[in-house]
Amino acid sequence: MRTEDFISEKDVIKLETLCGWIVNYGSMAGTVSWIDDGINPEFEVFATPNWEGDGRVPIAVMNYKTDEYVERDVIDFTKSKYVGNLKLQLEVYKKRVETIISELQ
């Protein structure tokens, strides 16, 4: 499979906000995360598309109050219905991240 078959960090950064949380792009590492407060976040949801170059999106939550990092989910876009369908991938990404954010609010 080719990188072009999957959404990238550039695609999700364009969303800007999900459930009122703002996107955060770590340009040094290439990570995408969502934070509940741009100044002093309580939580950060990490969800970088195609992180390992394998068509998957690992989703993890960092709780800064408890200093706990928990892996929550993995979206697998390698199934044939997703490969090359960037619009569908972006919709699924958005829904899954919004679900996790809503559980934290």
Image: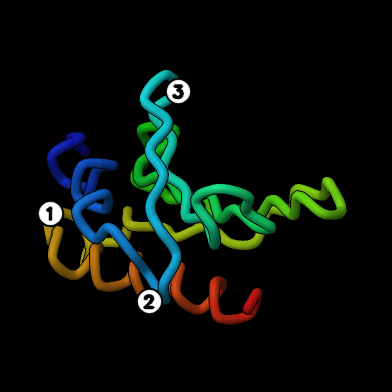
Kindly state the secondary structure of the residue where label 2 is placed. Answer: helix
Q: Establish if 43 lies above or below 103.
A: above
- Asked whether disc 2 touches disc 3, contact meaning CB atoms under 8 Å apart, the reply is no
How many C-alpha atoms fall within 10 Å of the one at disc 3: few (<14), some, or many (≥20)?
Answer: few
**Residue drawn at the location 44% of the way across and 32% of the way down:** 52
The colour scheme of the drawn protein is rainbow
- Asked whether disc 3 touches disc 1, contact meaning CB atoms under 8 Å apart, the reply is no
Q: How far apart are the alpha carbons under marks 1 and 2?
A: 19 Å
Q: Residue 95: x percent and y percent?
A: 38, 76
Q: Establish if 63 lies above or below 20.
A: above
> Residue 28's quadrant in the figure?
top left
Q: Amino acid at mark 2?
A: Lys
Q: Residue under circle 3?
A: 29
Of label 2 and label 3, which has the lower sequence position?
A: 3
Of label 3 and label 1, which has the lower sequence position?
A: 3
Which mark is drawn over residue 84?
1
Which quadrant, please, contains the C terminus?
A: bottom right
Which mark is drawn over residue 95?
2
> Residue 82's quadrant in the figure?
bottom left
Query: Relative to the observer, which residue lies in front, 65 or 89?
Result: 65
Which quadrant, please, contains the N terminus?
A: top left
Q: In the picture provided, is 21 more to the left or to the right than 61?
A: left
**Residue drawn at the location 76% of the way across and 49% of the way down:** 64
Q: How far apart are the alpha carbons under marks 3 and 1?
A: 25 Å
In this rendering, which labeled residue sits more in front, label 3 or label 1? Answer: 3
Query: Relative to the observer, which residue lies in front, 37 or 74?
Result: 37
Q: Amino acid at mark 3?
A: Ala
Q: Establish if 4 lies above or below 57.
A: above
Q: Establish if 105 lies above or below 72.
A: below
